[in-house]
Image (cartoon, rainbow, N blue to C red):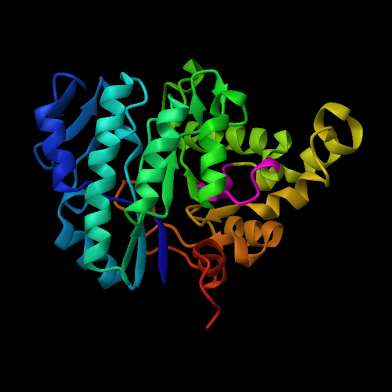
Amino acid sequence: MHDFHTHFIPNEVLNWLEENKNAVHAEWIKKDPSKEDFLFINGKWGFELKQPFINYDLYMKEQENIGVSHSMISPIPQLFLYDFPVEITTEMSRVYNHSLSQLTKQTPDKLSAVGTVPLAHPNKAAEVLREAMNIGLKGAIIGPGIGQHMLSDDFFKPFFEEANRLKTILFIHPLLCEDPRLKRRMMPNLVGVPWETTVCATDILLSGMIDQYPDVKILFAHGGGFLPYQIGRLDKGYEQWKLVSSNLQAPPSEYLKRFWYDTVLWNEASVDNLVKAVGEDRVVGGSDYPFDLCVWPPKEISEKGAQTLLEYAVK
């Protein structure tokens, strides 16, 4: 069984945070005596630093115990550091990427990883992505955009050109939605997280950029948000409006099958609907472990999705 959506923080990253805590406004806060410290960066999106996030032996044991044979580790979104100067974000990216590379080299049969890049600076992001691939990472995890810049904007062209040249996996992971209407009842996470993926994925699909960068392998977190469920609406818009169809060579439902999606959905019917919409070769097992909202164990439909994403031969 594979887990394509799982997060870990190596010791080198923790040490960097401690050394640069003033620069990134890092705080470790004890919110509950029964829990580990919560880590906040710049006062945002605090999360509990559970032991599986930072204890490599425990992380590997938990994966093994649940039946996961191979995990693709990702940096955590809270440490993308897109809001900081390029020097800080680049330094963190390189520390994180190098440490993940070292971990995967210890047990390459059990681990692979994607790195992080200074996405707010696309030329530098392209450079860091190239470095990450050269040390054995599979690609990068990135957010759904920067401020008002969507990933389909020309602003990101240098990054996507390099990603396409390298045939990179880009794992697109949402950040918390800051819509003020959602500031209650955990809705920034419950609704905002998949909503951010939905907006990003819809924009990428309708922009036609997948035709421009056919060798970039895009993996969407959380089953693609709400997009697969609403693909019929996009197909109808494609029939009705030139603004929807002008960049596309086929209906949106066909483009939907050119991305990959994890199974972090917690609902059998939702997973079934996703597989029906895109095919089992585009759906990969994922958990979001060890965050609070994780699917544990991860749900893997078949090995076909892993085979197409990692490009290894069918057994």
In the image, residue 74 sits, relative to residue 200, either above or below, namely below
Locate residue 273, reporting x and y percent: 66, 57
Residue 61 can be seen, yes or no: yes
- Residue 181 part of the magenta-drawn span: no
Q: Position of residue 290 (x, y in %)?
A: 29, 51
Left or right: residue 296 versus residue 54 is right
List the single residue furthest toward the bottom.
315
The x and y percentages for residue 53 are 22, 49
Residue closest to the eye, 130 or 223: 130
Asked if residue 175 lies left or right of residue 304, the reply is left
Q: Is residue 164 above or below residue 20?
A: below
Residue 160 placement: quadrant: top right
Which of 273/81 is in front?
81
Query: Is residue 30 in view?
Result: no
Q: Which quarter of the figure has residue 82? A: top left
User: At 42% across and 33% down in the image, what residue appears?
Assistant: 125
Residue 220 lies within the magenta run: yes
> Left of 111 or right of it: where is 123?
right
Report the side of 145 relative to 228 (left or right): left
Query: Residue drawn 66% across and 32% down?
Result: 203
* Count of marks, rendered view: 0
What residue span does the magenta drawing correspond to? 212-225
**Which residue is drawn at the image coordinates 47% and 16% (left, top)?**
180
Query: The N terminus lies in which quarter of the figure?
Result: bottom left
Residue 281: x and y in percent read 61, 66
